[in-house]
Image (cartoon, helix red, strand yellow):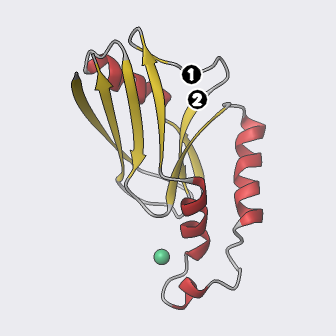
Amino acid sequence: MRVGFKELFLNTKRRREIIDITEEVQKAITENDIENGICLIYSTHSTTAIIINEEESGLMEDILRKIDEDYPKNGIWLHNRIDDNADAHLAGAFIGPSIAIPVKDGRLCLGTWQNIFFLELDGPRIGRRVIIEVLGI
Ligand code: ZN
């Protein structure tokens, strides 16, 4: 079995933003020459998340609106006593920092309407680090 790594450093432009990283993840598999195995996509931040869903502009806005509804910026959050981003930490905690996807015949096993997205929850930021680890043969 082999293990390969690739890192992404993403610059975000808005407080909340969705960035499609599907192509970069697929490249990690190709560059590491893994045919069959598993791919882990992991964000190293407390105020970001990784999701899989359909890339459709209305849906992207719906996802951001749902995050705002569930984790309002002006909620009574205790973390805001020392910082002003409790909403972003909460969204990151409950959406989650990582996903794993099977790899078969050198390709991510994504459905026709599935893409991989990095969620910025407290931008804009420079150099958001995402680690892609590919394990397989
Ligand atoms: Zn904070």
Proximity of marks 2 and 1: CB atoms separated by less than 8 Å: yes
Q: Residue at x 54, y 68 (%)?
A: 89
Residue, far top = 105
Q: Quadrant of the C terminus?
A: top left
Residue, far front = 1
**Residue for badge 1:** 110
User: In x, y percent, where is residue 45?
Assistant: 41, 59
Visible in this render: residue 70? yes
Above or below residue 62? Residue 74 is: below
Above or below residue 133? Residue 13 is: below
- The kind of secondary structure element at disc 2 is strand
Label 1 beta carbon less than 8 Å to ligand 1: no
Q: Give the CA distance from mark 2 to mark 1.
A: 7 Å
Q: Residue at x 60, y 59 (%)?
A: 94
**Residue for badge 2:** 115
Left or right of 59? Residue 24 is left
**Amino acid tagged 2:** Asn
User: In x, y percent, where is residue 18?
Assistant: 58, 45
Residue, far left = 2
